[in-house]
Amino acid sequence: MTDLILAIAHHLAVFTLVAIFAAEFALLRPGIDGKRLGQLGALDRAYGGMAMLVIAVGILRVIFGAAGWEYYVGNWVFWAKMVAFAGVGLASIQPTVAILRWRKASKADAGFSPPPAEVSASRRFLYLQAALLVFIPSFAAAMARGYGV
Protein backbone atom coordinates (compact mmCIF):
# COMPACT_ATOMS: atom_id res chain seq x y z
CA MET A 1 0.00 0.00 0.00
CA THR A 2 2.90 2.39 0.79
CA ASP A 3 4.29 1.89 -2.71
CA LEU A 4 0.92 2.76 -4.29
CA ILE A 5 0.49 5.89 -2.17
CA LEU A 6 4.01 7.07 -2.97
CA ALA A 7 3.52 6.37 -6.69
CA ILE A 8 0.26 8.33 -6.75
CA ALA A 9 1.80 11.23 -4.81
CA HIS A 10 4.82 11.27 -7.11
CA HIS A 11 2.72 11.26 -10.27
CA LEU A 12 0.39 13.99 -8.98
CA ALA A 13 3.37 16.14 -8.00
CA VAL A 14 5.00 15.67 -11.42
CA PHE A 15 1.77 16.48 -13.29
CA THR A 16 1.29 19.57 -11.13
CA LEU A 17 4.89 20.60 -11.81
CA VAL A 18 4.30 20.33 -15.56
CA ALA A 19 1.04 22.28 -15.30
CA ILE A 20 2.77 25.10 -13.41
CA PHE A 21 5.57 25.08 -15.97
CA ALA A 22 3.01 25.36 -18.81
CA ALA A 23 1.34 28.33 -17.09
CA GLU A 24 4.71 30.03 -16.60
CA PHE A 25 5.59 29.36 -20.24
CA ALA A 26 2.30 30.89 -21.38
CA LEU A 27 2.65 33.97 -19.15
CA LEU A 28 6.28 34.83 -19.90
CA ARG A 29 5.86 36.91 -23.06
CA PRO A 30 7.19 40.23 -24.33
CA GLY A 31 5.24 43.14 -22.86
CA ILE A 32 4.60 41.46 -19.51
CA ASP A 33 4.32 43.98 -16.69
CA GLY A 34 2.62 44.90 -13.42
CA LYS A 35 0.10 42.38 -12.17
CA ARG A 36 1.29 39.75 -14.65
CA LEU A 37 4.85 40.01 -13.30
CA GLY A 38 3.44 39.32 -9.84
CA GLN A 39 1.59 36.28 -11.16
CA LEU A 40 4.73 35.10 -12.95
CA GLY A 41 6.71 35.43 -9.71
CA ALA A 42 4.07 33.41 -7.83
CA LEU A 43 4.11 30.72 -10.50
CA ASP A 44 7.89 30.54 -10.42
CA ARG A 45 7.86 30.14 -6.63
CA ALA A 46 5.23 27.40 -6.96
CA TYR A 47 7.34 25.72 -9.65
CA GLY A 48 10.36 25.63 -7.35
CA GLY A 49 8.29 24.39 -4.43
CA MET A 50 6.69 21.68 -6.51
CA ALA A 51 10.09 20.60 -7.82
CA MET A 52 11.22 20.17 -4.21
CA LEU A 53 8.11 18.09 -3.49
CA VAL A 54 8.78 15.91 -6.55
CA ILE A 55 12.32 15.31 -5.26
CA ALA A 56 11.16 14.56 -1.70
CA VAL A 57 8.48 12.10 -2.78
CA GLY A 58 10.88 10.58 -5.30
CA ILE A 59 13.43 9.95 -2.55
CA LEU A 60 10.72 8.36 -0.43
CA ARG A 61 9.81 6.11 -3.38
CA VAL A 62 13.43 5.03 -3.77
CA ILE A 63 13.76 4.25 -0.05
CA PHE A 64 10.32 2.81 0.74
CA GLY A 65 8.99 1.73 -2.67
CA ALA A 66 8.43 -1.88 -3.69
CA ALA A 67 11.37 -1.95 -6.12
CA GLY A 68 13.89 -1.20 -3.37
CA TRP A 69 16.72 1.29 -3.49
CA GLU A 70 19.07 -1.28 -5.06
CA TYR A 71 16.93 -1.28 -8.21
CA TYR A 72 17.38 2.46 -8.63
CA VAL A 73 21.04 2.95 -7.78
CA GLY A 74 22.08 0.23 -10.21
CA ASN A 75 19.81 1.38 -13.03
CA TRP A 76 21.40 3.60 -15.70
CA VAL A 77 17.95 4.70 -16.93
CA PHE A 78 17.18 6.03 -13.45
CA TRP A 79 20.40 8.05 -13.51
CA ALA A 80 19.62 9.34 -17.00
CA LYS A 81 16.25 10.48 -15.64
CA MET A 82 18.02 12.21 -12.74
CA VAL A 83 20.40 13.95 -15.16
CA ALA A 84 17.41 15.17 -17.21
CA PHE A 85 15.70 16.43 -14.04
CA ALA A 86 18.90 18.17 -12.92
CA GLY A 87 19.17 19.73 -16.38
CA VAL A 88 15.65 21.11 -16.04
CA GLY A 89 16.60 22.50 -12.64
CA LEU A 90 19.74 24.15 -13.96
CA ALA A 91 17.85 25.59 -16.95
CA SER A 92 15.30 27.10 -14.55
CA ILE A 93 17.92 29.23 -12.76
CA GLN A 94 18.23 31.95 -15.40
CA PRO A 95 14.47 32.62 -15.70
CA THR A 96 14.07 32.59 -11.92
CA VAL A 97 16.86 35.13 -11.44
CA ALA A 98 15.39 37.30 -14.21
CA ILE A 99 11.89 37.12 -12.71
CA LEU A 100 13.22 38.10 -9.28
CA ARG A 101 15.05 41.06 -10.82
CA TRP A 102 11.96 42.11 -12.80
CA ARG A 103 9.71 41.87 -9.75
CA LYS A 104 12.10 44.08 -7.79
CA ALA A 105 12.17 46.63 -10.64
CA SER A 106 8.38 46.46 -10.89
CA LYS A 107 7.99 47.28 -7.20
CA ALA A 108 10.23 50.33 -7.65
CA ASP A 109 8.51 51.44 -10.87
CA ALA A 110 4.86 50.47 -11.39
CA GLY A 111 5.21 50.96 -15.16
CA PHE A 112 8.21 48.65 -15.50
CA SER A 113 8.21 46.07 -18.27
CA PRO A 114 11.22 43.80 -18.85
CA PRO A 115 13.19 44.47 -22.02
CA PRO A 116 12.04 42.17 -24.86
CA ALA A 117 15.58 40.80 -25.27
CA GLU A 118 15.61 39.67 -21.61
CA VAL A 119 12.20 38.05 -21.98
CA SER A 120 13.39 36.26 -25.12
CA ALA A 121 16.51 35.04 -23.35
CA SER A 122 14.42 33.65 -20.50
CA ARG A 123 12.02 32.00 -22.93
CA ARG A 124 14.95 30.20 -24.55
CA PHE A 125 15.66 28.61 -21.18
CA LEU A 126 12.00 27.62 -20.92
CA TYR A 127 12.27 25.93 -24.32
CA LEU A 128 15.33 24.08 -23.05
CA GLN A 129 13.41 22.97 -19.97
CA ALA A 130 10.54 21.76 -22.17
CA ALA A 131 12.95 19.76 -24.32
CA LEU A 132 14.53 18.14 -21.27
CA LEU A 133 11.15 17.47 -19.65
CA VAL A 134 10.30 15.14 -22.53
CA PHE A 135 13.06 12.78 -21.44
CA ILE A 136 11.84 12.38 -17.87
CA PRO A 137 8.59 10.45 -18.57
CA SER A 138 10.38 8.59 -21.36
CA PHE A 139 13.01 7.31 -18.93
CA ALA A 140 10.32 6.63 -16.30
CA ALA A 141 8.37 4.49 -18.77
CA ALA A 142 11.54 2.60 -19.69
CA MET A 143 12.32 1.96 -16.01
CA ALA A 144 8.77 0.75 -15.35
CA ARG A 145 9.32 -1.85 -18.05
CA GLY A 146 12.59 -3.09 -16.60
CA TYR A 147 15.09 -1.29 -18.82
CA GLY A 148 18.40 -0.18 -17.41
CA VAL A 149 19.14 -3.00 -14.97
Image (cartoon, helix red, strand yellow):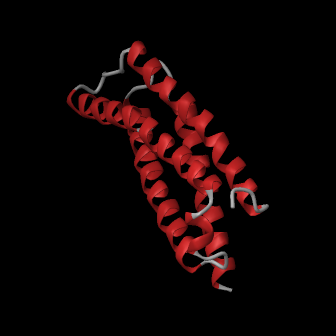
Query: Where's residue 93, x and y in %?
Result: 38, 37
Query: Where's residue 59, x and y in %?
Result: 50, 68
Quarter of the picture holding the N terminus: bottom right
Residue name at image x 39 percent, y 26 percent:
33
Q: Looking at this rendering, what residue extends furthest in the left direction?
A: 108
**Vertical position of residue 28 compared to residue 114: above or below:** below
Residue name at image x 37 percent, y 30 percent:
34
Closer to us: 21 or 110: 21
Quarter of the picture holding the C terminus: bottom right
**Vertical position of residue 2 compared to residue 27: above or below:** below
Query: Where's residue 74, x and y in %?
Result: 59, 63
Closer to us: 73 or 132: 73
Answer with the quarter of the image where residue 131 lies.
Answer: top right
Q: Looking at this rendering, what residue extends furthest in the right direction?
A: 145
**Vertical position of residue 113 compared to residue 14: above or below:** above
Query: Where's residue 127, x and y in %?
Result: 57, 28
Closer to us: 86 or 50: 86
**Vertical position of residue 116 compared to residue 76: above or below:** above
Closer to us: 127 or 60: 60
Residue name at image x 62 percent, y 60 percent:
75
Left of 95 or right of it: where is 6? Answer: right
Total of numbered circles in the picture?
A: 0
Answer with the quarter of the image where residue 5 lies.
Answer: bottom right
Left of 103 or right of it: where is 81? Answer: right
